[in-house]
Amino acid sequence: MHQTCVNYFHTHLLQVYGCRVQKLCLDGGFTCPNRDGTKARGGCYFCDASGSGAAHIVPTDSITQQLRNQKKRCEQRYGAARFIAYFQAFTNTYASIPRLRSLYDEATADPQVVGLSVGTRADCITPAVCELLAEYVTRGLRVWVEIGVQTINQRTLDQMNRAETVDDYRRAAQLVKQAGLELVAHVIAGLPGDTGEDFLRTIRFLNEIMADGAKIHNLYIDSRATLASWWRDGKCRVLGFEEYVSLVADGLEILSPRCLIHRLSGQAPRQYHLAPAWALDKNLVIHSIEKELERRRSRQGARYPSEVSSESF
């Protein structure tokens, strides 16, 4: 049953393109409005000094060089034949339209690149940004806009120095969907101050904004993040393994079956990862969530209250 109990993004890509499609993480040299003083300073307390960028990227390389290096690595390691250009680190719509166009054009020039994925904040989504991204759809590319929702508990967001609101998310989601772009929401389970019910409310929010995809992961402690000192001082706990598995299974049951799952676990680079130890075994986490759904004789969307047909799975 575990083959079909979760609607995985990677399975969807394989079905659509008939081959392995791999994301290539890129660093466009962006910053963030709550790091440079526009909204706040210091960044979100759970975010590391690299803006959650991939550890293997060389930021000083050109976008073309970053793509070339990663393509070679992914072709050899995964046998990938198609690629998604993924601007990951910091806020990747936080620049002028001409600069964004230049970076996105360079990232999508390779004919093996079939899509563009852009990680950003809700308050950095504007009609002009969406109009620009929609241009790539007209060129035959798929475009994903990845927005860090994290939680809809505003008190938690404020405590984490998020410097944006749930209403920002609603507005941004509407702009993204109206532009014909694919919306991917990031959610963190176990943020300080959040409860299990807050996590489930956040999953219901993803249904409300009609998220096309979801990245769900546990809170983890990166030694370079502000939360590291909280954790060392005993002011911040991380979820236990079984606690996390059960909570995510609960969330998947109420999440729309049409929402593609991009990830179900998270960890810092091994040299910076402080806790939880279990998060370092990503395959175990994913397999255990699948097994929990199997134990329940359940699946993603089993308790989703809508007219969505089970045949869509």
Image: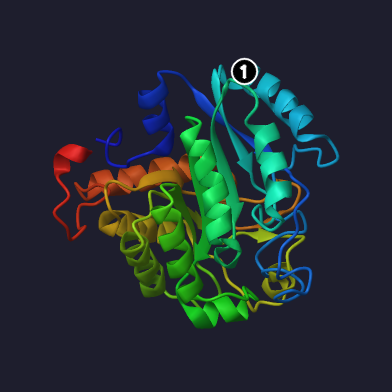
Q: Residue furthest right?
A: 60
From the viewer's side, name the closer residue of 43 and 222.
43
* Residue at position x 38%, y 49% in the image: 212
Q: Position of residue 124 (x, y in %)?
A: 61, 63
From the viewer's side, name the closer residue of 207 and 188.
207
Q: Quadrant of residue 108?
A: top right
* Residue at position x 28%, y 53% in the image: 256
Q: What kind of element bears circle 1?
A: helix
Q: Is residue 232 above or below residue 281?
A: below
Q: Position of residue 280 (x, y in %)?
A: 60, 46
Question: What kind of residue is marked 1?
Answer: Glu
Q: How is the image coloured?
A: rainbow
Residue 278 visible at all: no
Residue 57 visible at all: yes
Q: Position of residue 144 (x, y in %)?
A: 49, 44
Horizontal relation, residue 36 to residue 294: left or right: right
Q: Is residue 110 above or below residue 309?
A: above
Q: Quadrant of residue 204?
A: bottom left
Quadrant, the C terminus? top left
Quadrant, the N terminus? top left
Q: Residue furthest bottom?
A: 155
Q: Total label count?
A: 1
* Residue at position x 71%, y 48% in the image: 98
Horizontal relation, residue 312 to residue 83: left or right: left
* Residue at position x 56%, y 61% in the image: 125
Q: Position of residue 126 (x, y in %)?
A: 56, 62
Task: Using a 10 Å C-alpha cutoff, classify the residue at mark 1 as few (fewer than 14 neighbours), some (14 to 19) or many (20 or more).
Answer: some
Name the residue tied to disc 1.
75
